[in-house]
Amino acid sequence: MRDRYQQLVSSAPGRFVARRVGLPEPPTLRRHQAGDPVAAGPVVLGPTPAVVDVPGTPVPGTPVAGASVGGGAGGRLVKVIRPMLTAAGVVVREPRAEARPNDPRPHALVFDATGLTRSDQLHALFDFFGPQVRSIAPGGRIVVLGTPPEECADSREATAQRALEGFTRSAGKEIKRGVTTQLVYVSRGAEDGVESTLRFVLSGRSAYVSGQVIRVGASAGSRPDDWQRPLAGKIAVVTGAARGIGEAIVDVLARDGAHVVCVDVPSAGSSLAEVAGRANGSTLTLDVTAEDAGRTLAEHLPDGVDVFVHNAGVTRDRTLGRMDAARWDLVLDVNLSSEERINDVLLDGGLLRAGGRIVATSSMAGIAGNPGQTNYATSKAGVIGMVQSLAPVLAARGGTINAVAPGFIETQMTAAIPLVIREAGRRMNSMTQGGLPVDVAETIAWFAAPASAGLNGNVVRVCGQSLLGA
Ligand code: NAD
């Protein structure tokens, strides 16, 4: 789906005018379609296993040294990832000093930076990405893998690893054409658990996720028998399922094999039934703010639930001086307090099955703030606090809790924003366009997958790398 401006600048006269006056030209994002491979082309993986630590000009067409520059040891991930990618059908290529004739453009450049223990070794990033970055295909991927700074052996290593964040965020802002960049910090001992994240960040499922720092911790996840249906046999609940992002979450979780219980307010009953019918799911009309919402959910789910998605949300915008208590209270109750009450039933009441997943919907507003949205931003920042504080509780039960923070997503909620603010919201990101509900849904499905057990307490923005909020 393209917005009207995108349609205009993708026509020949529109493109001509846009280029002349320097207007943005939003790229067409390649989103995942059924049957798509994990990567749309070869993936260049570095550093090479045989690290050559000698200065000098590499012979054209031969592997470049990668992390060898500055004396850094090879990373601990590259040898784990290579067979993972190959098994996923990805063509893995060595980094080359110069492109060979007829070389297909790489879809992704993946660099294992876990071997960088001193700041002077960061030169390896320049060596690896510099010669290759311009050849990356439109809609390609840049992925840097690191060690969480807080787990590093000393200050020097923590400094080098923390520096990776500036590199990936800047690369994302610099390289256009729908290329995304991510930094994935992988805890020691969590090497085997990185597969679901690699598959997500390389594929079209993450088309509108860029500039993110993702943390994969050590946890015993299970690889699915079928990566196309990782949620087969699971029960998922999605609140606010009747339309917008919730509707897309239902579609994607059902596609991944889950039986989805679709929850929304009674007044949304007919569209809720339509959404659930299409997904072979079931409906539960329920106002999540009702005092007995938790009990109703428990009665409706005698076998418990594997995946609970807190998606229902409302806005009632007013500047603080004009805000009435009803607007404040409603937004806080729907977007935050009701989720806490339901979590009590999921956790203390035992409704969430062993290894269960909770995914909550925050917002860019909860990270960056937004004029006219003190109530909304308070609730959505609270969601982040809820996720981060409950992560250890979930971990103790073998489960996880994570949040997505959407930026500008094309839904009825954002269609109600005044035109000029709406247009600014759409363009102020590295993709120069709004995201689609499916972009948020794919990110939630990644968190929900059994193989994502190492993702806990993450807040991942689905915002096309919005300029707001870092
Ligand atoms: P939407 O308004 O299109 O849909 C929200 C759904 O939640 C509706 O079906 C509504 O009936 C339901 N709902 C509202 N109150 C409820 C209640 N008390 N009980 C049960 N259901 C209730 O919104 P959307 O754009 O699809 O947003 C979905 C979520 O994503 C929300 O939490 C929103 O805050 C968040 N979000 C959206 C955007 C965006 O750009 N659209 C950006 C950031 C965050």
Image (cartoon, rainbow, N blue to C red):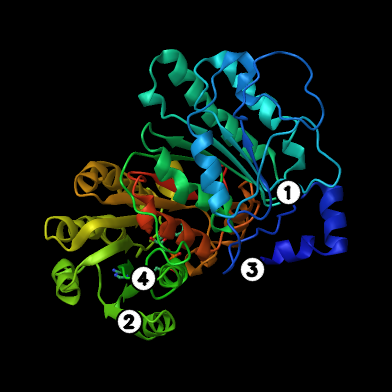
Q: Amino acid at mark 3?
A: Met
**How far across and how far down the image is residue 215, in percent?**
41, 39
**How far across and how far down the image is residue 352, in percent?**
21, 61
Q: Amino acid at mark 4?
A: Ala
**How far across and how far down the image is residue 180, in percent?**
61, 46
Mark 3 and mark 2 residues within 8 Å of each other at the beta carbon: no
Q: Quick one: label 4 or label 2, which is nearer the N terminus?
A: 4
Disc 2 target residue: 267
Q: Name which residue lies at 39% across and 76% down.
A: 242
Near mark 2 (Cα within 10 A), the count class, few <14, some 14-19 or many ≥20, is: few
Q: Tell me the element at label 4.
A: loop
Q: Name which residue lies at 57% across and 69% down.
A: 34
Q: Quick one: label 3 or label 1, which is nearer the N terminus?
A: 3
**Marks 3/2: CA–CA distance:** 28 Å
Report whether 338 appears left or right of 247. left
Q: Amino acid at mark 2?
A: Ser
Disc 3 target residue: 1
Front in this rendered view, residue 202 or 103: 103
**Marks 3/1: CA–CA distance:** 21 Å
Q: Name which residue lies at 76% across and 47% down.
A: 105
Report whether 469 appears left or right of 99. left
Disc 4 target residue: 258
Q: Tell me the element at label 1.
A: loop
Near mark 1 (Cα within 10 A), the count class, few <14, some 14-19 or many ≥20, is: some
Q: Quick one: label 3 or label 4, which is nearer the N terminus?
A: 3
